[in-house]
Amino acid sequence: MKNVGELVRRKVDTGFIVERPRRLRSSAAMRDLVRENRINPDGFMQPLFVVPGTRVREPISSMPGIERCSIDETVRECRELWSLGLKAVLLFGVPDEKDATATLNYDPNGLVQRAAREIKDAVPELIVAADVCNCEYTDHGHCGILDDRGGVDNDRTLEVLVLTALTYAQAGVDVIAPSDMMDGRIGAIRRALDADGYHQATIMSYAAKYASAFYGPFREAAGSTPAFGDRRTYQMDPANAREALREIMLDVEEGADIVMVKPALAYMDVIRQVRDLVDRPVATYNVSGEYAMVKAAAERGWIDEIKIVDEMLLGFARAGADIVITYFAKEYLRRHGA
Ligand SMILES: [Zn+2]
């Protein structure tokens, strides 16, 4: 009995090993030629936080490089993003007044509504998406309207979401993006939009949104930390993937044009399963905590930020995401162009 090493050597010598995957990695040009997935900057969406006032640019300490901007500065930012080749932004309103029932959310002259109008005037071709939720507008910080026991009242919340979506459509928002995770909201919003003639208003549903610790820095940015309790009665359990597919199918049936998985990094398997399940565009949200972790480690010199960001963005593409909502969009476009 000959030893294994000798056998292997003999097989190599006589050409028995026919599988040589390294051939396709042999040069940069060869790797370019056979690459399966690419980062697609046309599918990027940059989130923007809109605050009251003029000439306001407030840095967010846990998200270096990201600022909360007044409407005039948001418009300036949008012009720059468009010139860099970005196709879409996602607006979040951060009002300085809040109440129990999110009244300012559906003010026709609210922050998001005015910002959308001014952006569409200045940069008509830039796609303006706007987040529809109540947590930035309620004094208790929950995404819905509360019942008398302090729980989130699903159907009462739908009324506010519908009113808000209508004012967004009226202001020229191209993509309405409900993020609240109430049951039945996509159908309610679609019916109301169609009834008022807003057939063109597109709905991007935060369909599988998990109750995640990765949202931490966003809550500083948007001032939306719940005053009590948590969001686990409406956002999804991070342990569940089958439930995500059910949520996605419900939203597709109710009329969602685009479905989203949020967060992204820890949920790549869900992105892939959703991609395989539906024929709609799939979005994923590369959330604030994912951004902050990269920035913090890069600041300490522990990782190569640019390589890490590119690898993450490529990972989302490989998992099947068509649209990536990411705080890295602007920096990426500055580096590579569209
Ligand atoms: Zn919310």
Image (cartoon, helix red, strand yellow):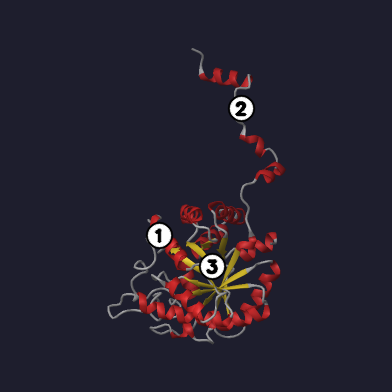
Q: Quadrant of residue 232?
A: bottom left
Q: Amino acid at mark 2?
A: Val
Q: Amino acid at mark 3?
A: Met
Q: Is residue 288 above or below residue 274?
A: below
Q: Which residue is mark 3?
A: 63
Residue 91 visible in this rendered orientation of the protein: yes
Q: Is residue 125 above or below residue 213?
A: below
Residue occupying the point 50% across, 59% down: 264
Mark 1, other Cα within 10 Å: few <14 / some 14–19 / many ≥20: some
Q: Position of residue 226 (x, y in %)?
A: 38, 74
Q: Position of residue 53 (x, y in %)?
A: 57, 85
Instruction: Identify the mark at residue 18; answer none if there is no mark.
Output: 2
Q: Secondary structure under badge 1?
A: helix
How far is the residue under mark 2 from the one under mark 1?
44 Å
Toward the viewer: 84 or 184? Answer: 184
Q: Which residue is mark 1?
A: 246
